Amino acid sequence: TDAGTMGAFVLRLLAARTLDPEAAHDLAVSWAGDRYVLYERTGRSCLVATVVLDDAEAAATFVEVARGSGLGAVAAEPGAPERVTLRGCAA
């Protein structure tokens, strides 16, 4: 088990895979915090992460970036649209 934060830099690197450089930068600037936990389940590496952005619009952009990158289940949290949760395990 490992836990920590990814930070705005990792968010920008991820966003740069699907967004133009300016949009990736703008998304990274909207980063307001995150927390992740890596763990093993039935021999597979799994991740649960929550990323907090400045507003719902930035969160919606991040949801699309994460889905386009194949990061598993991605959803904005009900009642807190600026928070995005990622869940997935390696194949």
Image (cartoon, rainbow, N blue to C red):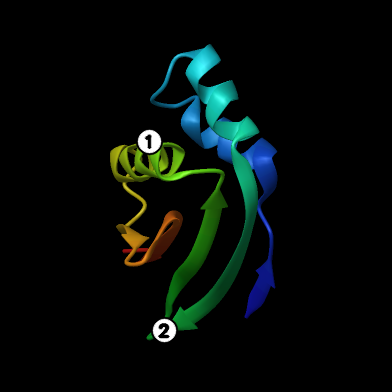
Q: Secondary structure at mark 2?
A: strand
Residue 20, horizontal then vertical, whole percent: 45, 14
Quadrant of residue 18 within the rendered picture: top left
Q: Which residue appears at 53% of the width and 55% of the height?
A: 51
Q: Where, quadrant-wise, is the N terminus in this rendering?
A: bottom right
Q: Where, quadrant-wise, is the C terminus in this rendering?
A: bottom left
Q: Which is nearer the eye, 58 or 1?
A: 58
Numbered label tally: 2
Label 2 CA crowd tier, 10 Å (few <14, some 14–19, many 20+):
few
Marks 1 and 2 sit apart, C-alpha to C-alpha, by 29 Å
The amino acid type found where label 2 is placed reads Arg
For residue 41, the mark is 2
Q: Which residue appears at 66% of the width and 40% of the height?
A: 8
Residue 25 lies, with reference to residue 57, above or below; the image says above
Residue 29, horizontal then vertical, whole percent: 64, 31
| The furthest residue to the bottom | 42
The amino acid type found where label 1 is placed reads Thr
For residue 26, the mark is none
For residue 61, the mark is 1
Q: Secondary structure at mark 1?
A: helix
Q: Which residue appears at 60% of the width and 33% of the height?
A: 28
Left or right of 20? Residue 27 is right
Label 1 CA crowd tier, 10 Å (few <14, some 14–19, many 20+):
some
Quadrant of residue 90 within the rendered picture: bottom left
Residue 64, horizontal then vertical, whole percent: 31, 39
Residue 24, horizontal then vertical, whole percent: 52, 24
Report if residue 89 is visible in the image.
no
Quadrant of residue 77 within the rendered picture: bottom left
Q: Nearer the viewer, mark 1 or mark 2?
A: 1
Q: Which residue appears at 37% of the width and 52% of the height?
A: 71
Residue 10 lies, with reference to residue 3, above or below; the image says above
